Image: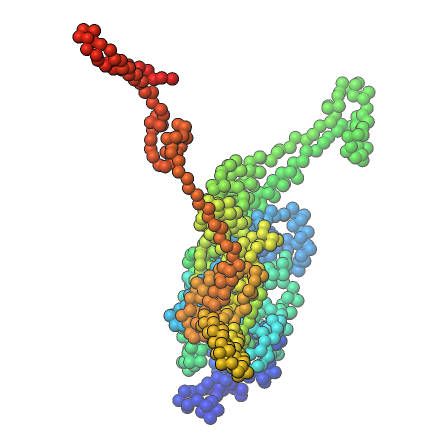
Amino acid sequence: MADFPERTGVVENEADSGQPEDEGPRLTPINFDDYDYTPGERAPWRCSPKPCYGPDELGFLRGAIDELIKGTEQADAAARIWEVLQAWEQRLFRRNYHFLNAGWKGWGMFGGSSGTTGASILQTQNSMKLFSCNVFGARHKKIVALLSREVPPTEVVPAGENTMDQETAQEAIPYLKAFREQAKMRKRMQEVGSYLYTDGSAVMLTYTVADRKYGIEIDDEGNPGPARREEVEVFGKLERKIPLQADDLESAGWIRLSKEKSRSILKARYPWIRDRIGGGANKDAMGQIDRMARANVRLAVQASSTSGEAYSEDTTESAYFFRPSQYESIADENMRDMLYEEFASGLEVWTAGGEIGLVRESSLDGPDGHVALCHATPGDGQNRESIGTNYLPIQKVLNATISLYDRYFRANVPKRMAGEPFIDVEAANQQANDPAKFIPVDMMSLIQNGLKIQDITGIENVSQPNVAILTYIQYLIQQLPAELDGGQPAVFGGDGDADGQGTFGEARLDRDQALQVYSLPWGDMSSAVACLEAQAIKSASENRKSDFSLGLPGERISVSVGKLGGNVLVWPSSTEIPPSMAEQQAEIGAMIQAAPTTPFYAGILADPRNLQSFRRLPSLSGLKLPGLDDVTAQVEDNIKLLSSEPLPNPVIPQMEQQIQQIDQQAAMAAQQTLDPMQRQQIVQQAQQQAAQLQQQLTQLPPLVTSVPVAQDASEDHQIRAAIALAEMKSPRGRAAKVGNEQQQKGFLNLSLNWQAHAQIAAQLAPPPTMESRASFTVDPTKLPPDAQTIAFEKMGLKIPPIALQVQPQEHEVTEESEGLDPQSGVPVKRKVSVVGKPLN
């Protein structure tokens, strides 16, 4: 074994280490007490449950770690320069710095040279009329706004079927709401979208950070310390270095992340190397060009290098993450074996100004890691095209074309000419060009020479710019970018066809189809957000010291950190860009209009759970939504109910005491009564009263909800019952129903609260309106013909109208007579019938 320095931090024998002798040497972590150091007290501290080692504690492993760092700095040197220059140029174009020169120091502004000031560069460009029409920057704002409409939604599911994983999945729901607010994820998405536009990729770094600015919290042992919360940092191509041939983060063996920080902050963060932290970047040339590019863009300078103050006051802080496989690059077998043993899951190294400040075990990615990566486009390797790649050459051509058109106007302004001595040109030039004033002319000379006014004045004939140049400029600004990437103007609310007058449905279809172009970066952003949220959940469970609560618009959430210790999976809910707030408002407006005829929409609008979604609409933000206060209050009550158990019914002991008092009073009264019959009557009455109370007692529930329920209409019990029932049916409620004993008690507590609200809502509801029913009998044949037709139709009888009409009938008249038969003289009776038309 090699000799160790005087202070190595490596333990050499069993007596010092407490480890068996055959396990070999061990590293001793930094003792913060030696430096009177509390993480987060003086500067933000990235927390980890793993032990931390400084350069003095590493011993002979310091050389192995230096070798790993050196390997990352020398990797892909030429390709890295090209990658830096590409991203650097696009970031400058975004800032409206379009006229650039490339030199050995990177990009510099046209008109600048060694020792040139920014003022002289601006003067040179102004004198040369180098003015940019920054369409590249305008499109950047539109696309970033599109990609940061909201934080991509995610879903959390338990990794296994055990109770702990299910409990973590449920507790992660309120935690992620708090995380997105505390980590300012909406702003982080804007940074990611900006890097995807100019750089083509973005890296997100997630840690639990202890910082006094968050306040003071008390741990389980009663010790105060700086409060902790999860933070996310975003890095672009200029800030990150990764093996360029790796197609994804999983196939990359290492990554380096760098940003400039105040040297004072870094000294406060790493006091054990305070005297070694100087200004500047890492000690290799690649680190210097990276740093120069970052400072050049961030300081918005117009020179190719930054001022000396930037180098002296700011220092580069870098984080290196190595997978265990990278240990194979170490030639010394002893060092390599010790790295595998001490840092089994991977290595995390932080440097300040090139000096190692912190080393500890850490995974690179995954739920146990800290890094998430996303790209703007699919492709090969890490140096992929950005969203703005197609727009950059268009911008350059546009600048040249507009400059050409401008020179046409400036160079070809026609000159006015006047003949002397007929017109005093010097006197005319001294006069204002005022139509109310006259210029004297020697008319006598004109008449003598046979001239007119138009013969002694004229305008120079100059060439005019081609009208097609204006059409070409409009094509470069509006049509060509959309043709190159498919991002139609409909995405940003514009009309791609000025003459087209399509329907609203056609316009919406155009917008949705155009949005598909940007679903590529959005989908990768969604996956990266799901990854970092899984990392945040894991980090919070390992590094948070206490439970916390947070007030959000419309609700207050509480998080139990102890319930986040299980294993969960986080997936993106959708890879489609969500609709804007205006689009959501239009859809809800259409839903409201269709609700009277569409029961499905009516049910959605009637559900009180949707009131919290409606309140986010801009047009409703200033209005009072009936029932929203009860929804918010019940949501808060649900959290309290699930985290506590029901209480014994306070009415039961009161009634038991009342029964006991009745028995005691009856016994005393019976003792004071001499009449046996009266004494028996007193006892019987007391027994009857006690029996009635005992019967009522058996009907009372033994437990009641821990959150009191108002017994009057001061609460909207119908809404509160609906919100409580929805919580019982939610994933969190279902998990509590079949969870451990404490969770089942919480579910019972919630169920009792729901029952109490439902009972009071039923008691306070007005009695139902009695439906009035009446019947009568009528002979339809007694009605007029039209009324008969309607009556038979109501009865469902299909009788043709002609059958209901009175048909004409022939009239028969019969006459009888008596007399003698004239032939025989015998008396006879005669009957005569005559059939004819109806009688009127």
Residue at 41% from the left image edge and 90% from the top image edge: 20
Residue at 46% from the left image edge and 90% from the top image edge: 18
Which corner quadrant holds the C terminus?
top left
Splitting the image into 4 quarters, where does residue 476 fall? top right
Q: Position of residue 590 (x, y in %)?
A: 50, 46
Q: How many marks?
A: 0
Splitting the image into 4 quarters, where does residue 839 fall? top left
Splitting the image into 4 quarters, where does residue 44 fall? bottom right
Q: Is residue 132 above or below residue 340?
A: above
Q: Is residue 231 left or right of residue 308?
A: left
Q: Position of residue 142 (x, y in %)?
A: 55, 51
Q: Position of residue 681 (x, y in %)?
A: 49, 76
Residue at 80% from the left image edge and 25% from the top image edge: 441
The one nearer the camera, 344 or 706, is: 706
Q: Residue furthest left?
A: 824
Q: Is residue 382 above or below residue 513?
A: below
Residue at 45% from the left image edge and 54% from the top image edge: 576
- Residue 211 in sight in this render: yes
- How are the residues colored? rainbow
Which corner quadrant holds the N terminus?
bottom left
The one nearer the camera, 758 or 615, is: 758
Q: Residue furthest top?
A: 823
The one nearer the camera, 415 or 174, is: 174
- Residue 191 in sight in this render: no
Q: Position of residue 704 (x, y in %)?
A: 49, 71
